[in-house]
Image (tube, rainbow, N blue to C red):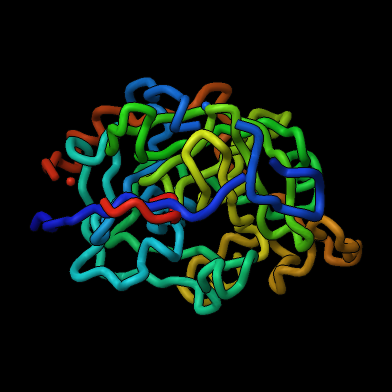
Amino acid sequence: MPLLALVLASTWFAGGPIPGPGHIDHDPPGPLIYGGEEVEPGAWPAVVAVQTDKLCTGTLVAPNLVLTAAHCFDPAPSGEVRISFGDDRLSGVQIMSSEWGSHPEFCLPSECGEDLHDFAWVRLPGDMPIAPILPITNQAEFDELMQVGHEAIFVGFGEDEDGVVGIKREVEATLTSFNESGREFRAGGGGSDTCRGDSGGPALVKLASGEWRLGGVISRGGDCGLGGIYGVPLPELCWLRDDSGVDLLPSGCDQCDCVALLGEQADDGCGCETRGGSSPDTPPRMSWWVLLQLGLVAGLGARLWWRR
């Protein structure tokens, strides 16, 4: 399997306190994988390093599909994309892919302000024997999990307080506000945050049943430690289906209009079903036999404002 020569530019996007629902401000209250800790060996196996010409993070949402951020593919990669499964980006299972796509409406904050559609996907050449983490797809889960004050776990391979990148880390932080459309939210602050290299990684939320869901995808932020802005994948799942061919929507939700985001009114006639997912009481771990079965391959900035 060929190795990809990489130049990893660490980047981030803008940041700051969130006064309340319906508005994302640009200065959150003051340590997330910045301020967090390394994961236990084998934890969160569905969270992967996404290496184009820069370092990002992603989440396995289907056996052969990784969801990440669109800005990780802007500009387009100069070669294949490397997806790294494991506890760091150098020593885990390395999968190469030339199949990827980014949201056609993705735009810069200078052009759009918010609702950037900062989503992209990478299709793997085969299914991984790892349980994916499903996005939220129904109203009951959204109402339970996506509220100001709810705690989430953020996981990524980005920069920590000492400037070290490429090691999978996690941190717990609070959702602090949503923008008016409900398509983006801010979380973290007080030293707990994501940072450069974490772009595209997950905001993971846990149902009362114990099942984990993907509630947000890391997009951008200001100074690391002050909080970041995350895109909600739920309203983008129709694009994901049409563009990648992977349908994560439950029966009855084929138009992506069955769940009311903040400020919207739910359509009670959709009858969306709940799709099951993994339900561990502790973060799922990658078994070492998977690594041995797949084979191990050893697989590095300008400080901008994307969290990549």
In the rendered image of this protein, does residue 172 appear above or below residue 176?
A: above
In the picture provided, is 54 more to the left or to the right than 31?
left
Q: Split into 4 quadrants, where in the image is the N terminus?
A: bottom left
In the picture provided, is 222 more to the left or to the right than 162?
right
Location of residue 27 (image quadrant): top right
In the picture provided, is 13 more to the left or to the right than 189?
left
Residue 152, position as x, y percentages in the image: 62, 34
Q: Residue at x 60, y 58 (%)?
A: 233
Q: Nearer the viewer, residue 209 or 223?
A: 223
Location of residue 48 (image quadrant): top left
Q: Nearer the viewer, residue 19 or 199?
A: 19
Q: Nearer the viewer, residue 170 or 192?
A: 192
Q: Nearer the viewer, residue 45 or 274?
A: 45
Q: Residue at x 32, y 50 (%)?
A: 10
In the rendered image of this protein, does residue 167 appear above or below residue 134?
A: above
Residue 32, position as x, y percentages in the image: 50, 31
